[in-house]
Each structure stands twice: as C-alpha cells, then as structure tokens.
C-alpha cells in the first residue's frame, strides 16, 4: 500500500516562507512523478508543481508560483519538498502531495493547510 505523509504547513505572514515535505512509502510499487497541488476554499484543486523522475529530473510549475516556489526530492529519504518563498495571501490553501504511479494511477496525501495572513 502506498502512503504519503505531508508536513510543514502553518500560518505565515505575507512575504514569508514555508517548506512542505511529503514522505512516500511505496513498498514494491514504483512511481515516476511527484508533485504538489492545492485547493483554496470554494475552488477546485489546482496544479502547483511537479517533478518527473529522470536522470536529470524535470520540474514544472504553475505560472502563479514560478520564481517563488521550488520543488525538489530526496531520493534517499523518498521525500518530495516544496520550498515556498514570497508567500501571498492568494497562496492560502490546503496543499496536497501527489505521486503518479508507474501502473497509471495517482496517490494523494491527506493535505496540509497553508495560511498566508497578517
């Protein structure tokens, strides 16, 4: 069974930073991409950033977070991280970790709340 455990959310002032982490326990199942999505109140879940696992790793970002957020992974620890800088009130949302399995399905974490407010 694949499990994702997120951590690192919280309350931060505008302009501040937070770092989200997601620990992946996949057992014998392999995956080829990891990412973060978010869902603000009253809105649909939206893409934030992904990292496709290759020799050089390929990252992709939503336009709204480019230049402010950085996705990375630690292969030894099976974690995917999201460093969020210059946070804005509109970044407030529940952030979900996602893993795309090689068998063609997605696994989601339970979500972690990020609130940007003064």
Image (cartoon, rainbow, N blue to C red):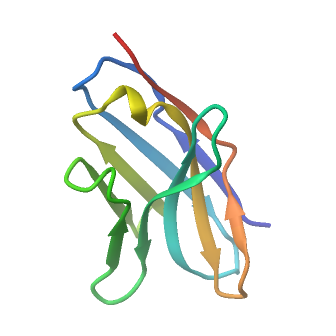
* Residue closest to the eye, 92 or 74: 92
* Residue closest to the eye, 118 or 2: 118
Task: Name the image quarter holding the C terminus.
Answer: top left
Query: Which image quadrant is residue 27 in?
Result: bottom right
| Residue placed furthest toward the top | 118
Q: Which residue is painted at 43% across and 79% down in the image?
A: 52
Q: Which residue is painted at 35% across and 70% down in the image?
A: 60
Relative to 54, does residue 66 appear above or below in the rendering? above
Whole-percent x, y for residue 41 in the image: 63, 31
* Residue closest to the eye, 112 or 76: 112
Whole-percent x, y for residue 72 in the image: 33, 61
Q: Which residue is painted at 24% across and 38% down in the image?
A: 85
| Residue placed furthest toward the right | 1
Relative to 21, does residue 92 appear above or below in the rendering? above
Query: Which image quadrant is residue 4 in?
Result: bottom right
Whole-percent x, y for residue 21 in the image: 46, 47
Q: Which residue is painted at 47% across and 30% down in the image?
A: 92
| Residue placed furthest toward the front | 42
* Residue closest to the eye, 22 or 95: 95
Left or right of residue 100: residue 49: left
Left or right of residue 10: residue 68: left
């Amino acid at each position: 069974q694949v499990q994702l455990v997120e951590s690192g959310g919280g309350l931060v002032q505008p302009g501040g930073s937070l770092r989200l982490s997601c620990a992946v326990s996949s057992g014998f199942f392999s995956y080829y991409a990891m990412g973060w999505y978010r869902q603000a109140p009253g809105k649909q879940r939206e893409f934030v950033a992904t990292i496709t696992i290759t020799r050089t790793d390929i990252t992709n970002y939503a336009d709204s977070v480019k230049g402010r957020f950085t996705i990375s992974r630690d292969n030894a620890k099976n974690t995917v991280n999201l460093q969020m800088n210059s946070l804005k009130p509109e970044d407030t949302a529940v952030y979900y970790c996602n893993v795309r399995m090689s068998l063609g399905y997605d696994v989601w974490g339970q979500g972690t709340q990020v609130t940007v407010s003064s």
